Image: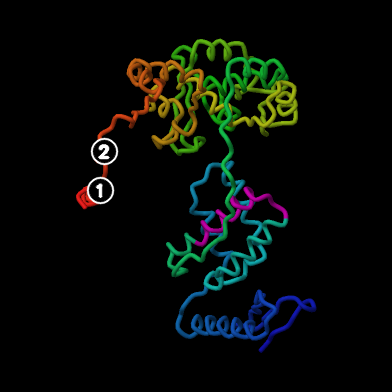
Amino acid sequence: MALYKRTAGGSWWTRFAVRGRTIRVSCRTSDKRLAEEYETALRNRYWRQEQLGERVHFWREAVIRYSREATWRPSTRTRNEYALTFFSRIERVPVAAINADVARAARDFVEQTQATSSANRIMAVFRGVLRACVRWGWLTHCPPVPMTYVAEREPVWLDTKQCERLITELPAHLRAPVLFSVLSGLRMANVRDLTWDRVDLERAHAWVPSSHYKTRRAHGVALSATAIALLKSLPRAGGRVFTYRNRGISGTFNTKAFRKALKRAGLVGVRWHDLRHTFASWLASRGASDRVLQAMGGWTSPRMPARYSHLRSDELRPWAEALSTFAGTALNIAVAPVVKKSRKNSVPGRGLEPPTRALRMRCSTS
């Protein structure tokens, strides 16, 4: 057995040659007996490949095919390709050798540098590659990939006064994008990448192509009079609608200047995406139906409007008052004092349970 250790007390490694190519893989265990079993199974797999024509697929091969076949948006592709770099240590490991222990070790490695939510997103990409291997027939089943529960964040949305206070504290180049995000409900990337050729001020209409939208469907935006006035006030320095120093903004709007403005406005904890919650909540408070919300927000699922639209208790009070017309009589009954019946003039024997009454009758006759 060609087993060895790189460091004292570390994991065992195996090394052997197949058709002149050296295979060097970690056994992921410090137990020599388990390492020997792993090496034997690995050698058998390569033997079946050579003698029976069974092909061994490696992790690197799976990553290349998965990235090639995936239909990601440009921003999503950048994020997912970065997530796959965390697993470069197993690029020469056969896909069939990736089990629950390997997935657990990968999770532990990711958590060394990433927060829980970020680790979940990275491991979701790892799980996506394994599930694709099942579809391709490279794996019989997907091993369990550990995920850590993260408590859902409480919904946050702004009222009109908070929105005005935020815009007042923002630097000049961020005021228009913030207000347009509230008026259109577009995500940050769609607002940043909006170009003038996708805006029709005469028809009061803007659109986002399917290649740039999250749902992979082209999304049209109805522009209000306020939104049109805002767009007309912007200079047309280039292709982008929202610019900084006459150049398109290529990064993120969630900058240090934005966070400092939130702090000055007393809105600590608010994210840029909460402007989309604000958009849906303002529409819901004006009586927009779920179908209208779904269309204006560009959601494909009818459940999303309920997730993004929120109503404050003062906005629900008129509906609560509408119940008073039905509960007037019940209120009088509920607040009326309870009168207890007196037992002084009650007839003996009445109201007793049958066995007790029969017992008293036998006692009186005896």
**Depth check: 60 or 342 in front?**
342
- On the image, numbered disc 2 is attached to which residue? 348
Q: Residue at the spot x=45%, y=64% of the render?
A: 134
Residue 208 showing in the rendered view: yes
Task: Report the side of 2 relative to 188 (left or right).
Answer: right
**Depth check: 330 or 168 in front?**
330
Marks 1 and 2 in Cβ contact (< 8 Å): yes
Q: Position of residue 145 (x, y in %)?
A: 55, 61
Please check the rendered image and state whether residue 120 is part of the magenta-colored stretch, yes or no. yes
Q: Nearer the N terminus, badge 1 or badge 2?
A: 2
Q: Residue at the spot x=61%, y=46% of the render?
A: 78
Q: For the stretch drawn in magenta, what is the main secondary structure?
A: helix
Secondary element at image label 1: helix
Q: Quadrant of residue 25?
A: bottom right
Please check the rendered image and state whether residue 136 is part of the magenta-colored stretch, yes or no. no
Which amino acid type is shown beneath numbered disc 2? Pro
**Depth check: 64 or 325 in front?**
325
Q: Position of residue 364 (x, y in %)?
A: 23, 48
Q: Residue at the spot x=70%, y=25% of the render?
A: 262
Residue 198 showing in the rendered view: no
In the rendered image, the residue lying farthest to the right is 8
Region in magenta: 113-130
Task: Report the side of 345 relative to 71 (left or right).
Answer: left
Task: Report the side of 282 relative to 356 (left or right).
Answer: right
| Model colouring | rainbow
Q: Position of residue 92 (x, y in %)?
A: 62, 70
Q: Quadrant of residue 12?
A: bottom right
* Residue 360's disc number: 1
Q: Position of residue 106 (x, y in %)?
A: 63, 63
Which amino acid type is shown beneath numbered disc 1? Arg
Q: Does residue 44 sit above or below 169 in this rendering?
A: below
Q: Residues within 10 Å of mark 2 (few under 14, many from 20)?
A: few
